[in-house]
Amino acid sequence: MLDLIIRNGKVVDGTGLPAYIGDIGIKNGKIVITGSVKDSGKEELDASGLVVAPGFIDPHTHFDAQLLWDGRAKPAIEHGITTIIPGNCSLSLAPLKSTDRMKLVGMFNQIEEMPIKAFQEGVEWDWETFDEFIKRIKKSLSINVAPLVGHSVLRLWVMGDQSAEREANEREIKDMQTLLRECLSAGAIGLSTSFVDVDETLAPVPSRFADQKELNALCDVLSESNKMLQVVHEFFDADVTIARVDQLAEISLRHRIPTTLSPLFVNTENDSGVKRVMERVKEQFKRGARVWPQIQTRPIDISFCFEVPSLLFIRLPSWYKIMRFGTHTEIMEAFKDEKKRAKLVQEASMLGPFWNSITLRQVNNEQNRKYLGLSLDEIASKRNTTPVEAMIDLSLEESLQAHFLAENMGHTDNDMIGELLSDPHVHVGASDGGAHILSFSTYGDTGYLFSQFVRKSRAISLEDAVKKITLDTASIWGMKQRGCLKEGFLADVTIFEEDKIDRGKEYYTDDVPGDGHRYVRDAIGIDTVIIGGSIAYRKGSYTNATTGNIVSVG
Amino acid sequence: MIAKVQDLKISASHEGIAEVLLTIKHDNGGLTQVPLDYFAITSLMESCQVESIEGIVGTEWDKVRDAIESSHNR
């Protein structure tokens, strides 16, 4: 008898081959039979009318801290994700000497917006080495974790304060090599580094002080077990990105390792830049290098409130002036004063319908909560006013603490993004799950891949979209026996509704330790998520399964 | 001759905040784009002594570079 059988599903097996109707049989955490299963199971699921796919893999996350208090990495699983890769961008929570804890907390706070209070109240610091950290998070994992070790953290361990001041000497490089080797042996699937990030004092993070000699020495260690180098490059500059592609290609060829750089953004105004980057990526693949650019599926939204100046208003002189030079009181007075307000409203009309679609995302006053998630246009009609007047009124009522969202302001060229998503040289990633939690939701990119690019624009087929975020990801990172619904593979399975899978609306919630908040999104159309052969999520509810594991690579 | 600001556009940064994307035109006609954050753009407007963002069109690259540096060093 099998442990679990999924029957009558539309099996999209992760290879990109056409879907078929069939069954999947699971025993001891592995897929043991596909197609027609005659045996019976201790538990059976009827997946008629549903897609049965390998569990999705998210290669660019920052769930490091959250895993200390939430082994489910919520809400990743409910979006169909069964494996996450944390430790990106040169930052991991291990190895970390006890004396350096607050320094790293500062970096996480600056770069990933993880509240310091969450670390203070949600974390029992009982590890220093990578091995100790792995043992700590492994205790109650529901999701699979394939952790990277951060270059900045290696430097901090070996060089202390000098890690963010200078290049490393021979002895320090050797010490970093030894330390990296230990981390890889303990379960790290690669090394992450950053060429752009800054710490809590706005100074460059330690990894940015490394020279090519140091990078080569560390990649020598990665090459001993064929592990990945992840890089955050100067994504805002196409020419520097091309230079980084060349640099990574040389590293990949010299050390025979895969490399990945993230993120790659596409706006209508920088199409040519992205095209040039991709031409160079393809040239380097032709040479035999592995340089995988990561692209996120979701567009970028801009959030703002009138307490903090925003460039969103820079084309409106009166708005810019009051936000640039006005104090809190002066801005409030300008919003109240009949003449000044009339001028602001008149000036805002220059942007026409732009205001209508802006949504209200956060308020403090109970009476305004009913407007959360609504557009200014909708709020205005409920209040019998105009969208701009509604925005000003809400800001006054909330003492400038009303937060608004202008959606789809960046990474918006869906034609180009669709082309890239279907390109075999492009890696789907860069979700940043678990990061930027006070600015926007980093969850739901997988649902958006299907709703926007499979169903709406038809840029990519269902089978290829599944392959991109399952077997392709597993193959790029060297994860064995994952990402495919075949006999012998680990039983990570996502069952979803083909015509409904999507990301839900963003909302603000308070499930971060230390009274912390974050923006999240629920999933739409995910029926069941199976991790390591156990049902982790089904029909809107999590189970108590803790069959997540540390993913081995190589 | 030196590279100059040819055009500008409000865009979204990776962190979900508004930034200004400048298009810089080089001597040889080549175009490149440079994003400026709030501190850099206000610094640039002050150094150009303009009150409107459109006033920075035509500004030479060295002023843009100094504004970026001042933002970085703030």
Image (cartoon, coloured by chain):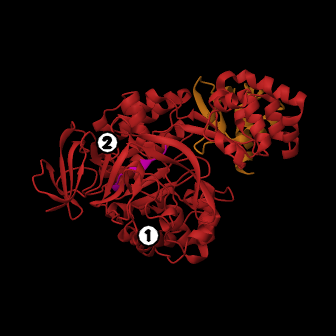
- As for residue A260 lying within the magenta part, the answer is yes
Colour of chain A as rendered: red
- Which quadrant of the rendered structure holds the C terminus of chain A? bottom left
Amino acid type indicated by mark 2: Val
Q: Look at the numbered disc 2 and give the secondary structure of its residue.
A: helix
Residue identifier under label 1: A137
Three-letter residue code for mark 1: Ile
Is A316 magenta? The answer is no
Parent chain of label 1:
A
Q: Quadrant of residue A142?
A: bottom left
- In this rendered view, identify the residue nearer to me: B20 or A33: A33
- The answer to whether residue B1 is above or below residue A20 is above
- Chain given the colour orange: B
Q: Estimate the x, y position of residue A501 in percent, counting from the top left.
A: 39, 40
- Residue A466 is marked as 2
Residue A114 makes an appearance in the image: yes
Quadrant of the image containing the N terminus of chain A: bottom left
The kind of secondary structure element at disc 1 is: helix
**Magenta-highlighted residues:** A255-263
Q: In the displayed structure, would residue A370 be above or below residue A317?
A: below
Provide residue A114's location: percent of width, then percent of height.
59, 59
Q: Residue at x 42, y 62 (%)?
A: A147
Relative to A321, residue B25 above or below: above
Which chain hosts label 2?
A: A
Residue B2, quarter of picture: top right
- A286 or A65, which is in the foreground? A65
Query: Going by the image, does A496 lie left or right of A379?
Result: left
Q: Give the mark nearest the N terminus, 1 or 2.
A: 1
